[in-house]
Image: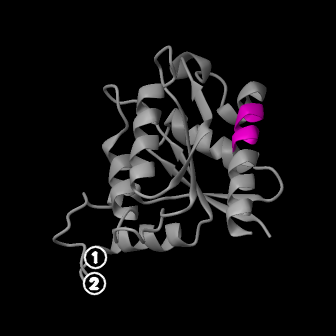
Amino acid sequence: MSVRILALVGSLRAGSHNRQLAEAAAKHAPAGADIELYEGLADVPFYNEDVDVEGSVPAAAARLREVAGQADAFLLFSPEYNGTMPAVLKNAIDWLSRPYGAGAISGKPVAVVGTAFGQYGGVWAQDDARKSAGIAGGVVLEDVKLSIPGSVTRFADTHPADDAEVVTALTEVIQQVTSQAASAAA
């Protein structure tokens, strides 16, 4: 039985290097891991407790929760926007954190990776995403990290799926997430 890993990409741009990194993860997922790239984060409205009530949850947020509820683990791909994670990723975490104590992310392994143009590969944003996911109830794999610097030049002519070093590092991340999810299910 495969571990279902839901990939949430913090960039909405079609040609985003983080989206490409998520595509590489899905393409090169090792045996035992099934990675689904979530489509539709752009449609999820900003979290508002006034509309997060039974029967009134916006359809896009309900769909996110439904798909996330079926996942065994999460792989978050975060670029760095002005020194932190993008609002779209934070918003997804907020929706998945509710209802308090029983959200779709609660108790499930979460790893955060990403790439950014800067020399540190977006580590501030990824650290913020780890913090937020942990507070939301996810079991953050603090030692599972991958921050790829210089995305604009590194991936100018090469898709991350064709970069052997990136594929090796992603495969290791996925194996660790898969192992943690399998242990949690046992």
Viewer-proximal residue, 117 or 181?
181
Applied colour scheme: one colour
Q: Nearer the viewer, mark 1 or mark 2?
A: 2
Give the left or right position of residue 151, taking residue 93 as reference.
right
Contact between marks 1 and 2 (CB within 8 A): the answer is yes
User: Could you tell me the amino acid type at mark 2?
Assistant: Glu
- Give how far across and how far down residue 49 sits, in percent: 20, 67
Residue found at x 20% / y 63%? 48
Mark 1 lies on residue: 57
Quadrant housing residue 58: bottom left
Secondary structure that dominates the magenta span = helix
Disc on res. 22: none
User: What kind of residue is marked 1?
Assistant: Val
Task: Give the alpha-carbon distance from disc 1 to disc 2, as whole Å.
Answer: 7 Å
* Residue 177 covered by magenta stretch: no
**Label 1 element class:** loop
Magenta span: 167-173
Would you say residue 64 is visible in this rendering?
Answer: yes
Other-residue count near label 2 (Cα within 10 Å), few / some / many at <14 / 14–19 / ≥20: few
> In the image, is residue 100 above or below residue 37?
below
Residue matched to label 2: 54
Q: From this viewpoint, is residue 11 visible? A: no
The residue nearer to you, when weighing 133 against 3, is 133
Horizontal side of 141 relative to 161 (left or right) equals: left
Q: Mark 1, residues whose alpha carbon is within 10 Å: few (<14), some, or many (≥20)? A: some
Q: How many labels does the image show?
A: 2
Residue at figure coordinates x 55%, y 19% from the top left: 149
Judge whether 17 appears above or below 65 on screen. Answer: above
